[in-house]
Amino acid sequence: MEPIPELRKIRTGIPGLDKMLKGGLIEGRPYLISGGPGAGKSIFVMQFLMQSIRKGEEALYITLEEPYDEIRQNMAQFGWDTRQVRILDVSPEAGTKEGSDMFSLSYLEEELVQELRRHPHKRVGLDSTSTLRMLEDHPTGGRRRILSIMKILTEARCTSLIICETNDNSPSMEGFLARGVIKLYTTTTAGEKIRAIGIEKMRGTSFDEHIRPFTITDQGIVIAADEIAFETFK
Ligand SMILES: Nc1ncnc2c1ncn2[C@@H]1O[C@H](COP(=O)(O)OP(=O)(O)OP(=O)(O)O)[C@@H](O)[C@H]1O
Ligand SMILES: [Mg+2]
């Protein structure tokens, strides 16, 4: 009988998060990052990818939404030189390549498989499944696509963060498919924007079940892993 491979955790590079995750994310699995508009999802994912670059490993950001030059500009605000992060730009602004439909999901899958064959990416971010689902007419088709992309990423041994935009608290199908779900919350108290983060599920490990406050600083996301978030978050 083959031995069962041991679980290995990797550090996220997000201050406070590894403590909440009891050491980091289990390597080689897909995770979901959910939150509303402006919650910090894209920053979160890029901060995770930058940790790979710091370690001399390759990382990939798949964007179906923001054009990559805007992402690079936004992330430069945190002192991150994202030029080493490879980008697979399938955003509407990327235009249509001759002979192929840029917006088709089959195109995305083919490009992704080829990209992973050429580059041994340790970490991958995908922004976002909401766009992915918009491109698929049928709900079951969307589910199949997300499953298929998660499978491609898992087979290539990537630890991946998949962004899911949410506006309410209804459980998403992506959440059931992912090995773990991290939620970013925002609320306004006395005219001030309050942010918080919670781990909703994480297969294979125990984790901090409290919702913790976080801020977006000039160095990115910083979680106060020892503080309690006093506001009520949905
Ligand atoms: N340099 C900065 N310092 C502090 N906060 C910032 C800075 N840059 C951006 N932010 C905050 O981060 C938010 C954007 O973060 P991000 O782009 O990660 O959100 P998102 O969840 O991906 O949003 P969307 O759903 O629109 O894609 C801004 O709305 C702003 O509040
Ligand atoms: Mg975003």
Image: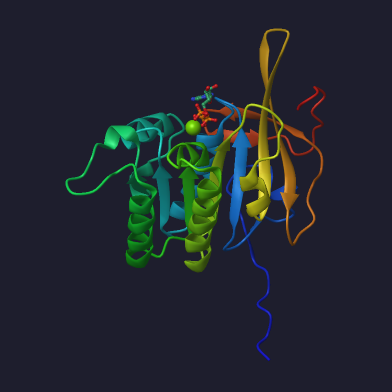
Q: How many marks?
A: 0
Residue at 47% across / 62% down in the picture?
Answer: 152
In this view, the residue in front, 131 or 17, is 131
**Residue farthest to the left, as pictured:** 98
Counting from the top left corner in percent of width and height, residue 121 is at 43, 60
Residue 80, picture quadrant? top left
Query: What residue is shown at x 23% (from left), y 40% (from top)?
Result: 96
In the displayed orientation, state which residue is furthest to the front: 138
Quarter placement of the C terminus? top right
Front residue of 11/140: it is: 140
Q: Is residue 192 left or right of residue 212?
A: left
Query: In x, y percent, where is residue 47?
Result: 51, 42
Decide which of 68, 153 is in the foreground and name it: 153
Relative to 86, residue 130 above or below: above
Residue shown at 52% from the left, 33% from the top: 219
Please report the residue visible at 51 percent of the width from the left and 42 percent of the height from the top.
129
Left or right position of 201 against 152 = right
Question: Left or right: 56 with respect to 129?
Answer: left
**Place of residue 43 in the rendered image (x, y in percent of width and height, measured from the top left):** 51, 35
**From what the image shows, is residue 81 above or below residue 147?**
above
